[in-house]
Amino acid sequence: MHEVVSLGSVNVDHVGYLSDDAVAALERQYDWLPVPGETTAVESVPKGFVDRLTEVSLGGKGANQAVAAAHAGADTAFLGCVGDDESEYGVCSGVGGHGVDVSDVARVDGPTGSAYIVVDESAENRITILAGANDAVDRQYVQPRLDTVRDASVLLLQNEIPSETAVWLLDRLADDPDAPTVVVDPAPAAGAEPLVSHDAVDVVVPNATEFHHLEAELAGFEGTLVVTHGSDLVSVAGPESFEVAPPAVDPVDTTGAGDVFTGYLAATLATGDDLRTAVERAVTAAALSTESEGVQPAVPDAETVDARL
């Protein structure tokens, strides 16, 4: 039995740290480039764009949040699919090296999912994703792993796997009195409407851009809504309503800070702490993660976060 199970995506990240002038040139050339802080899914990425992104690391919201939950001190498993290039990039060994159980990750034909991340001079990121093997996280993959999900204290879901898979799973959990607490990160926001409006979901964690996109659906959400605003206050609404300010930091890369937030939030809830403590711990971890480049290597450990608190 795991305290946290993250069912979602794992990606090979291609990252470019670019000047503001270079980012502006890309925006003029590629009208599909996301706005700062946004994640969008596309069918293909031009080679000329990829060539500007020279650093390679591991990411994916599902894997990132699992790594963050493990660093926060929770017994954590990641469920998802990798491609036949997994060993080339050391995907499972990389995620597993952070203390995450990856024994149920499946290997499928084709490439592992990928993300193309542009980071500007103010450390803001724009993320474009190609699904790759993440599209293979379907009902046939999830069904034999239902007991792993049901036995968890907290289930983490995102919108980088097929939404019909997530909805099918939520339907299975809706009438289960022993179902885990379900935390949903609705990114990318496009197509996340069925997730944030599902009765089985307990907590939704959008950033400000995602909240704006999903505001109509979230207006009827009866659970806990936790909205992050980058370096500004985190707003919590629902049975409890309050705000939490992040600590002051000197950011160099905000990529994945939202994943660190969500993973720490889930882990802290799973280990029995109250919501305010979980949000305070999560926002501190997320802020500290921005002081280093990358995502998974930048996740702070529990001792560092708790000492800062």
Image (cartoon, rainbow, N blue to C red):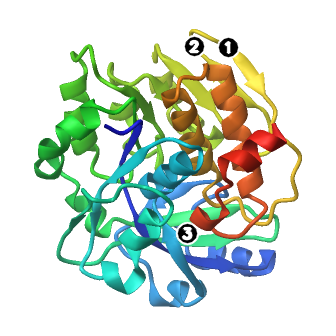
Residue 139 in view: yes
Left or right: residue 52 versus residue 171 is: right
Per the model, the C-alpha gap separating discs 1 and 2 is: 6 Å
Task: Give the structural element (helix, strand or loop) at label 1.
Answer: loop
The disc labelled 2 sits on which kind of residue? Gly
Residue visible at 60% across and 87% down? 52
Q: Residue at image x 36%, y 55%? A: 101
Marks 1 and 2 close (CB-CB < 8 Å) = yes
- Whether residue 114 sits left or right of residue 250 in the image: it is left
Please tell me in which quadrant of the rendered image residue 10 appears.
bottom left
Graded by Cα atoms within 10 Å as few (under 14), some (14 to 19) or many (20 or more), the crowding at tag 3 reads: few
Residue placed at 24% from the left, 56% from the top?
Answer: 104
Which residue is under mark 2?
238
Which circle, 1 or 3, is nearer the viewer?
1
Q: Residues within 10 Å of mark 2 (few under 14, many from 20)?
A: few
Res 263 quadrant in image: top right
> Where does residue 299 sit, x and y in percent of width and height?
64, 57
297 relative to 286, above or below = below
1 or 3: tag closer to the N-terminus? 3
The amino acid sitting under disc 3 is Asp
Which residue is labeled 1 in the image? 241
Q: Give amino acid for label 1.
A: Ser
Q: Is residue 230 visible?
A: no
Circle number at residue 31? 3
Secondary structure under tag 2 reads: loop
What is the C-alpha distance between the residues marked 2 and 3?
A: 37 Å
